[in-house]
């Protein structure tokens, strides 16, 4: 007899705030688990054991690009395959070779050693300033006053995005990464794309000493990033440049509090 499918409250905000217990339960009961996404209605596979994850990542039969791995019938109604979401899905995390290889070579030219090294002093300055503003406080919301402002300020300056717009980017990424409202996600993609179209066009006419200008200008053997690839790469850099660091800061401080002698 085939056992009944197990279900887990994966998308519950309380679960997502502290998911480790649920992950441990899934590893024991259903380590390769299929679930339906509440926003897209698509099936997700959760691999919760290390060895299984390694096996999948090394297996060439698995890939990122839906149109290469799904039939035309399966692609119908896929939200991430629609025009709205396509403008942020042509980046390194969503592409297989040879496009992945091509984009990696192009983007690498925008990250020069000089640009990265020049960030060191400014990052230290931003971190020090943020800590100075709360030095006299007895209690603070770490993520609100430090965890979020530090990385979003750094990535915004690196890209050339005004600091005054950082909260808009935070709202867009939260709607796309953590929201459960598909319509809000579509609005966020549209607003992000319109904002970046204007900035890219401005940088084409008036290049600046920032990463967006570098990405607009990069070229390799006559190849350049097209507009969709530019938008997708900028979105990836925004997400990877601040959302992951916010989580790292929060989890790192929490670990220090729980294991101060480690």
Image (cartoon, rainbow, N blue to C red):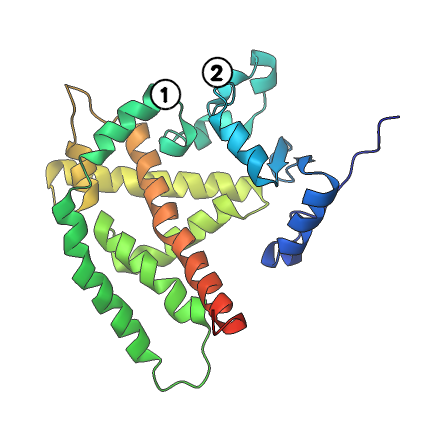
- Residue 135 in picture, x, y percent from top left: 34, 83
In the drawing, does residue 6 fall left or right of residue 214? right
Q: Is residue 69 visible?
A: yes
Foreground pick, 182 / 28: 28
First-in-chain label (2 vs 1):
2
Q: As displayed, is residue 207 above or below residue 16?
A: above
78 horizontally vs 201: left or right: right
Please give the name of the residue rendered at 48% of the width and 74% of the height, measured from the top-left corner. Answer: 260
Mark 2 to mark 1 CA distance (whole Å): 12 Å
Q: Which residue, given by chain and number where applicable, does mark 1 sit on?
A: 97
Quarter of the figure with the N terminus: top right
* Residue 123 horizontal side relative to residue 146, left or right: left
**Residue matched to label 2:** 68
Between circles 2 and 1, the one closer to the viewer is: 1
- Tell me which corner region of the image, top left, top right, bottom left or bottom right, holds residue 70: top right
The crowding category of the residue bearing disc 2, from other C-alpha atoms within 10 Å (few below 14, some 14 to 19, many at least 20), is few
What kind of element bears circle 2? helix
User: Residue 220 at what x, y percent from top left?
Assistant: 16, 24
Residue 119, position as x, y percentages in the image = 19, 56
> Outermost residue, front direction?
262
């Amino acid at each position: 007899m085939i056992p009944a499918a197990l279900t887990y409250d994966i998308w519950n905000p309380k679960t997502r705030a502290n998911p480790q217990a649920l992950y441990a339960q899934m590893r024991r009961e259903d380590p390769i688990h299929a679930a339906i996404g509440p926003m897209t209605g698509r099936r997700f596979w959760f691999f919760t054991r290390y060895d299984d994850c390694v096996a999948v990542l090394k297996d060439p039969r698995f890939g990122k690009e839906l149109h290469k791995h799904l039939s035309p019938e399966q692609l119908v109604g896929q939200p991430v395959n629609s025009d709205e979401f396509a403008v942020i899905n042509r980046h390194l995390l969503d592409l297989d070779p040879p496009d992945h290889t091509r984009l990696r070579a192009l983007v690498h030219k925008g990250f020069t050693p000089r640009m990265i090294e020049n960030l060191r002093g400014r990052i230290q300055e931003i971190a020090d300033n943020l800590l100075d503003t709360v030095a006299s406080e007895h209690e603070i919301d770490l993520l609100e006053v430090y965890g979020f402002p530090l990385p979003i300020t750094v990535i915004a300056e690196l890209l050339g995005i005004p600091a005054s717009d950082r909260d808009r980017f935070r709202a867009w990424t939260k709607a796309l990464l953590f929201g459960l409202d598909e319509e809000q996600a579509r609005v966020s993609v549209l607003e992000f794309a319109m904002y970046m179209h204007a900035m890219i066009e401005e940088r084409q006419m008036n290049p600046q000493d920032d990463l967006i200008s570098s990405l607009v200008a990069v070229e390799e053997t006559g190849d350049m990033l097209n507009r969709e690839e530019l938008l997708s790469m900028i979105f990836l850099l925004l997400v990877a440049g601040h959302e992951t660091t916010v989580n790292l800061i929060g989890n790192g401080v929490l670990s220090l509090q729980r294991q101060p002698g480690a």
